[in-house]
Amino acid sequence: MKTIVLGVGNPILRDDGVGIHVANQLKQHVNDPDITIDEATTGGMNLLDLIVGYDKAILIDAINIRDAEVGEVKRVLLSDLSSVHSDNPHDVSLLEALQLAEKLGENNIPSEIVIIGIVLKKIPYVFGEKLSPKIAAAVPKAVDMTLTEIGKNLEESNWSKDKLT
């Protein structure tokens, strides 16, 4: 199963870049030609371009969930969210981009899109590359949850653990 793992966020807006921090950690643990780990500093239509052609997409991003504590790590399906990382008024959310692609006949969209979300209540627009203590503490949890998600896919295709280093 061809899988893409994308750390999403802005690496110079502190906690908003948590997805990229997680992706960088994952690169040290995954060695499989069927798994691509990358970063995305964009949303909407540009994010859609990055995931087309894969069977599964795992997006790691800061999310806001009402009944969760800052720093919690949640596994969420894209269909559970109304918008995914589109604060840009000149773009659409990933969900809207996917709906448009389907209407236009795009058939290389991943059959499964999972979000590993690190809960923030509000993304502070403060410049810096360092994560706040609560969000930094969530990075190892998000790495573990993503490795578990990757392992689910690999087990279905007769995977062996030596593909994770």
Image (cartoon, grey):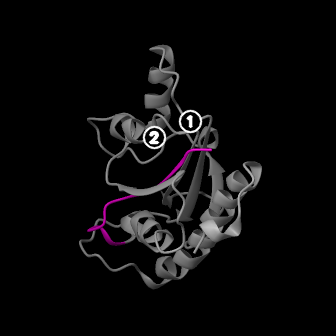
Task: Please provide percent x and percent y for residue 89.
Answer: 29, 38
Instruction: Provide the residue span drawn in magenta.
Output: 1-14
Q: Secondary structure at mark 1?
A: loop
Task: Count every numbered label the image shows and give the total.
Answer: 2
Q: What residue is shown at x 39% (from left), y 70% (from top)? A: 15
**Residue 86: image tag:** none
Task: Please provide percent x and percent y for residue 4.
Answer: 50, 49
- Amino acid, disc 1: Pro
Q: Nearer the viewer, residue 46 or 36?
A: 36
Q: Is residue 34 magenta?
A: no
**Label 1: which residue?**
110
- Amino acid, disc 2: Ile
Q: Marks 2 and 1: CB-CB under 8 Å? A: yes
Using the rendered view, name the quadrant where residue 2 is placed.
top right
Task: Please provide percent x and percent y for residue 107.
Answer: 52, 22
How many neighbours does mark 1 have within 10 angstroms: few (below 14), some (14-19), or many (20 or more)? Answer: some
> Of all residues shown, which one is farthest toward the top?
104
Distance between mark 2 and mark 1 Cα atoms:
7 Å
Q: Is residue 5 magenta?
A: yes
Q: Secondary structure at mark 2?
A: helix
Considering only order in the chain, which callout, 1 or 2, is on the residue closer to the N terminus?
Answer: 2
Report whether residue 73 is seen.
Answer: no
**Residue 51: image tag:** 2
Q: What residue is shown at x 41% (from left), y 81% (from top)? A: 132
Q: Nearer the viewer, residue 53 or 33?
A: 33
Using the rendered view, name the quadrant where residue 86 is placed.
top left
